[in-house]
Image (cartoon, grey):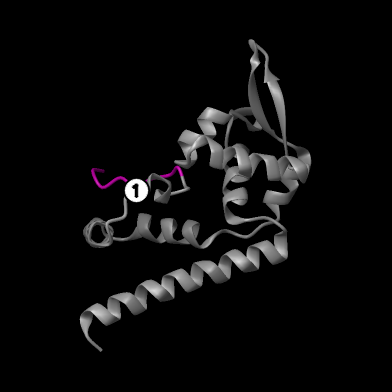
Amino acid sequence: MQSGDQIITNIRKIIRSLDLESKRIEKNYGMSIPQMILLTQLKNTPNFTASHKDLSKQLHLNTSTVTGIIDRLEKKGLVARTPKPDDKRGILVVLTKAGKQSIDRTPGLMQEKLLTKLQQAPKEDVRKIEEGLELLIKYLEIVDPEASSLLSTQISLSD
């Protein structure tokens, strides 16, 4: 198999694995991976509360995408919208007791497992992966800002 063909095959393996994980999570836990990530983000914030704007920034998603995720979670009773105490026009998103219980019973996601392994990997290996992926993104001419990580934790190569 030629090098280019192997790259395409490997990309397909990754996409297929992510797709299977997404379907498994949806089937077993009744929520999408972005919904799980938003719930996890809220669980890790003070008072389980964040503004819509902060969630958008932390998740690297546009506000309309986050609005859709929050709408679906609110219908399930996993989050609630409440007015900001200091500004009644502003809205806060709050993790409900049901939301906390729901996220507590879900498994770690593939990307969380990868992040843990990357944090333990030699910095040079992580740098090579980053450079290879950046080159791949360049060749694919990907410019979608929503393609960035949904995890707010980053690996620091300067440590």
How many numbered marks does the figure carry? 1
Q: Is residue 123 above or below residue 7?
A: above
Q: Name the quarter where the N terminus is drawn.
A: bottom left
Q: Which residue is drawn at 60% across and 37% down?
A: 67
Give percent across and percent down for residue 25. 64, 63
Where in the figure is residue 101, as x and y percent of width and height? 75, 47
Residue 157 inside the magenta-drawn segment: yes
Residue 20: x %, y % from top left: 56, 71
**Which of the 4 quarters of the picture holds residue 48?**
top right
Q: Residue furthest bottom?
A: 1
Q: What element carries label 1?
A: loop
The residue at the point 65 percent across, 40 percent down is: 70
Horizontally, residue 66 falls left or right of residue 128, namely right
Question: For the view shown, which residue lies furthest in the top direction?
Answer: 86
Asked whether residue 54 is drawn in magenta, I would say no
The residue segment tinted magenta is: 152-159
Rendered-image quadrant of the C terminus: top left
| Location of residue 43 in the rendering, given as x and y in whole percent from the top left corner | 62, 39
Q: Which residue is drawn at 64% across and 23% down?
A: 91
Camera-side residue of 77 and 117: 77
- Residue at the disc numbered 1: 155
**How dense is the environment of label 1, judged by Cα within 10 Å: few (below 14), some, or many (20 and up)?**
few
Q: Which of 29 and 11 is in front in this view?
A: 11
Q: What residue appears at the point 57 percent right and 67 percent down from the top-left corner?
A: 21
Q: Quadrant of residue 152?
A: top left
Which amino acid type corresponds to the residue marked 1 in the rendered image? Ile
Is 143 in front, or is 77? 143
Above or below 140: residue 104 = above
